[in-house]
Image (tube, rainbow, N blue to C red):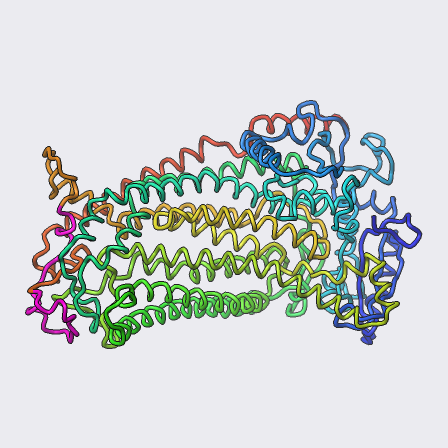
Amino acid sequence: MPTFRDGETNIDFILVYSEDDENERHKEMRKTFESHLAKEGMRFETEWLPCDASDHGGTSFIKINASWETLCRWAQISRLKKPFVRNDIFNNNRTTRGVIEKVYQSQNDYLTGCFKETNYTYDTHENDESFFTATFDKNRLDSFLMESKETFFTKTERYRLVNNILQITSYGENENDIGISQLLSEGAYLDAYPPHEGTWKLPKEGSALGPRQTLYWTWARMGAWARPQPLDLIRLYFGEKIAIYFAWLGFYTMMLIPASILGIVVFLYGVVTLGTEPLVKDICASNFTICPLCETCGFTPLRGSCTYSKITYVFDNSGTVVFAFIMSIWATFFIELWKRYRARLSYRWDTEDFEQEEDLVRPEYVIVSNKKKLNPVTGKMEAHLSTKIKARRVAFSVSTLVLMLLLVIFALFGIIVYRTITSVLAYQVTKDGIIRRNIRLIISITASIINFIVITIMDKVYSKLAIKLTNLEAPRTRTEFEDSYTLKMFLFQAVNYYSSIVYAAFFKGRFAGSPYGYNTMFGYRLEECDPTGCLIDVCISLAIVMILKQALNNTQELLIPIIKSWWARRKVNKGSASCSQQFDDNPTFQDFTLSQFGELGLFSEYLEMVIQFGFITLFVAAFPLAPFFALLNNIIEIRVDAYKFIVQLRRVPPLRGNDIGMWLDILQSISTISVLTNGLVIGITSSFIPKVVYSLLYGPCANGAETSLPCISGFLENSLGEIAVQDIRSMNIAVNTSLNSTPSCRFNAFEVTPTTNPNQINYWHILAGRLIFLLIFEHIVFGLKSFVDIVISDVPSDLAIASRRQKLLEIQLFY
């Protein structure tokens, strides 16, 4: 374990500054800050690394240890909870688990048994004895369960208490000169962090593992993918805020398993029944000729869309409707069951009555403030920014956000223009062959890849811009900063990632017109869908953006910290041999070469998963395999994030938390919107409703007629309008010579209003069917979602009883 040079005094925190810092103000800040810490009961030991471990020359490390008296005093101030009596309702951590968690544990215990186990000895704290806890009072120390002063406060509790002290200790005469965060912002210190507990590297078999090694062996390596996450040990090592993220990610991944299985079943159903689908057979055997889809496309045989029709049917079959319905309910089950799971974790980790630790005023706010104002809570005069100035800053920030969103829409418009013009040019330069026959598929794929590249570039640009805009708004506290930044980034990311899919699903081909009158833009006809529909474009766009995004994110998360650590170590190795050896022998120095946790904490991890949640709920009707790919990604994501925290990052100061914050509200909003989007995908984008309407009103089974023919026999011919070639006067068409004798051609009549297609008679029936379906689908799903929300309580009954008993015993202890 990390200690002072005497081998006995524990290191509770490390402050780092550059020896080359000649700024006299910084030196005075450090001197004042450290003297005030000493008055609080802190002890120090300084070590100096002469070689360049950073970009700041020689580096000094101030190791801090808090005395017993200091810890007790601040434990009472921080209202830390400590055990005072054994829990007579739950025996240990395992007994606090609910049904879902026990099923998850059983599944992982089975999978773990399939892998070779070593004879390491370690403790994941899953079987730790459960206790009732009470707010610590140093005057009632004897009432709490204590074996010794050395072990009474866990290492995480020590680190948290010392971090609290660092955050409120002054470093100057000004009343706003408070806290290590401001000193880091000023550059007086390079970093402040608790030490890792030993190395992560595994010893020989048969050895006992330390906490960091245990986390690596059971959690952070890819070989542990089938193991349950050791959440109790994660919490003891990193604190509740980090642990709750991994608990949520693990629970989300577990809930993806049934969704993935169902999506695979729907996909396989489409594959198995593909050979018996009448519509696919009709398209592949058709002799119909399709009217040119662009100025230079020429006439094409409908059977050229045979591949498209097969792919479309695999994803758009009768099982898709049921799957979309179930996934809309699944989203509600996921959120409600998470609330119950979170309640169990909050009880187990003593965060039920968690109150947000005091949010200190941000130094950036103090700098831009123009007056003082009395804080009614603290009774102190604090820096304040006038409402008028604040409003101007927020207005500029919002205007910039709107401009960026419009830029995303403009980029999407550019992709549409690319597809339109490329289609025209491609048909001009290609001859009959495999490329010409699949030109629309090639253009669709390349457009989706280009769109992903644009999305990635916009993402990087706006991520940096959003920080500047949020700083411009001058949020007063860290929480206000995070909330404002989160809202801006999510809105931008949602438009950035979802806009191209929304266009393909709901707008593409809707306004193109027909041979009776085409609509144009810049002299080019508007983009049309393939005769088999636009669902294939939605599927391709969703698959490429989702899969490439996940692969890129995991690669970045893994490689960037490795490169940074390698660069820091490389600079050390350039120094003298003695300096390099000194570095190798000192874990304090080695920790500093690791990457920083980052100013935004877990923001990027949550945002990535929430965007993914949108992919698998908002448009799952177009791509039933989305949950499966999300599951595969998350299995890797958990281990990549774990590896990053254990191996690549400096230890994170432990923070308390009992939920995922405003991300839960965003998830609930996405869940609600997904009902509408899936209903629209099924009702408008897919061919489900036209098939149903045809079967009931026009097909062989219409009006209850008995027939041996499939109910959708003749649907293909009914869905395609017909026009004589000689009547197409307004187009300059390069006619395919193999079809120049065709007297008429066909076009998709379902998307054309009767005003532009006088021969169409079932347009209004289909429109009515779509509206009726949307109303029925959404009312049923919203009704079931509300029912699930009401029936499933947020707090399990056994936890409610245990919580009431704990409060009763706490009252008896103190009164």
Given residues 23 and 168, the one toward you in this image is: 23
Residue that appears at 20% across and 42% down: 692
- Residue 77 seen: no
Above or below for 28 versus 129: below
Residue that appears at 35% across and 54% down: 539
Describe residue 298's horizontal placement relative to residue 585 as left or right.
left
**Residue at the extreme top:** 88
Q: Please check the rendered image and state whether residue 719 is part of the magenta-colored stretch, yes or no.
A: yes
Q: Specify the quadrant that holds the C terminus.
A: top right
Describe residue 599's horizontal placement relative to residue 327 as left or right.
right
Residue 686 at what x, y percent from top left? 27, 50
- Residue 123 seen: yes
Above or below for 45 versus 117: below
Above or below for 242 versus 351: below
Residue that appears at 81% across and 75% down: 23
Count the numbered circles shown: 0
Q: In which quarter of the image is residue 105?
A: top right
Given residues 409 and 234, the one toward you in this image is: 234
Residue 216 at what x, y percent from top left? 69, 47
Residue 273 at what x, y percent from top left? 28, 41
**Residue at the extreme front:** 433
Residue 215 at what x, y percent from top left? 70, 45
- Please give the range of residues in magenta: 714-742
